[in-house]
Image (cartoon, rainbow, N blue to C red):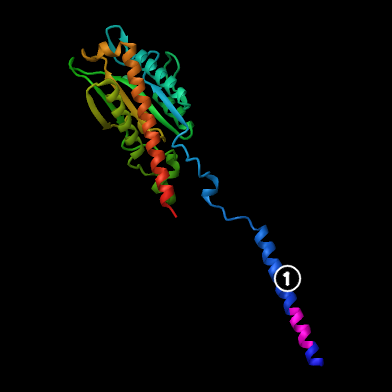
């Protein structure tokens, strides 16, 4: 009898122990936060925008007129085209920033600094070409093959920063240049001079995807008449805007595919 009661007691203890263990696990489960996953911060119905801001950089300004042909100054037309793009992007609900709003001189260094202070941006510099031959004509868009990464030079000796501090091939800028060039030519029917890699200061020293459009030859007898016409500059602005939108949609679509493909 005594042995029976003892074993009942023992099984009671085991039962209580089991119950407490279960309750404890349940409480722990309730109180433990879910593991942090990047997916928690990205709502599934809304894919992240590839950029939040377009910086428009009208070439030259103030005492720097840029190319001059007859009474036409490059600085005036680049500002006019940039303001047209600004209006078109605004209509699409896209935020913009201009590196100059009037006829003021802004150094290349100040432009790069302003651009690098922005977050999550793409950059379009707007220029008009200067050529020696009077019959030269057409549109070309530049990108920098290597760009600044935003890491101060002083930090680049640290071994773990080497990889990011090294110049990288710049696929975003190249692809932005291709979309803009394509749309510019489609809109204007101008001669397609293609996309080219060139370490222009503003392109090479900014940490965002950046391109430089040469929208035609101010010094070319074929282009000057067109460039002086506001309707043609509107076509240039439309081409630039559509190129930016195509770039955005393509980046967005490829990011979406990558998300669907991941487990
Ligand atoms: Zn220029």
Residue 201 showing in the rendered view: no
Image: magenta residue range: 6-13
- Number of dots carrying numbers: 1
Residue 203 showing in the rendered view: yes
Verify whether residue 9 appears in magenta: yes
Position in image of residue 50 (x %, y %): 44, 37
Position in image of residue 181 (x %, y %): 29, 28
Position in image of residue 28 (x %, y %): 67, 62
Camera-side residue: 262 or 156? 262
Position in image of residue 153 (x %, y %): 42, 40
Q: Determine the image quadrant of residue 56.
A: top left
Residue at image mark 1: 20
Q: Quadrant of the C terminus?
A: bottom left
- Secondary element under disc 1, as helix, strand or loop, is helix
Verify whether residue 37 appears in magenta: no
Q: What is the chief secondary structure element of the magenta stretch?
A: helix
Q: Residue at x 43, y 49 (%)?
A: 260
Q: Determine the image quadrant of residue 88.
A: top left
């Amino acid at each position: 009898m005594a042995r029976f009661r003892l074993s009942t007691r023992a099984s009671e203890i085991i039962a209580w122990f089991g119950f407490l263990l279960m309750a404890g696990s349940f409480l722990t489960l309730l109180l433990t936060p879910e593991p942090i996953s990047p997916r928690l911060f990205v709502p599934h119905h809304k894919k992240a925008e590839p950029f939040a801001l377009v910086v428009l950089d009208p070439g030259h300004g103030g005492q720097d007129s840029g190319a001059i042909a007859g009474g036409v100054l490059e600085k005036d037309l680049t500002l006019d085209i940039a303001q047209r793009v600004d209006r078109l992007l605004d209509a699409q609900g896209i935020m913009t920033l201009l590196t100059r709003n009037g006829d003021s001189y802004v150094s290349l260094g100040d432009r790069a600094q302003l651009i690098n202070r922005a977050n999550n941006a793409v950059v379009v510099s707007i220029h008009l070409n200067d050529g020696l031959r009077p019959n030269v004509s057409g549109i070309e868009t530049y990108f920098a093959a290597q760009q600044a990464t935003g890491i101060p030079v002083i930090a680049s000796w640290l071994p773990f920063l080497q990889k990011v501090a090294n110049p990288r091939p710049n696929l975003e800028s190249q692809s932005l240049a291709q979309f803009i060039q394509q749309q510019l030519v489609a809109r204007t029917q101008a001669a397609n001079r293609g996309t080219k890699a060139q370490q222009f200061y503003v392109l090479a020293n900014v940490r965002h995807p950046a391109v430089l459009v040469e929208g035609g030859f101010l010094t070319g007898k074929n282009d000057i008449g067109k460039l002086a016409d506001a309707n043609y500059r509107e076509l240039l602005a439309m081409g630039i805007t559509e190129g930016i939108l195509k770039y955005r949609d393509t980046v967005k679509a490829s990011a979406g595919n990558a998300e669907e493909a991941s487990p």
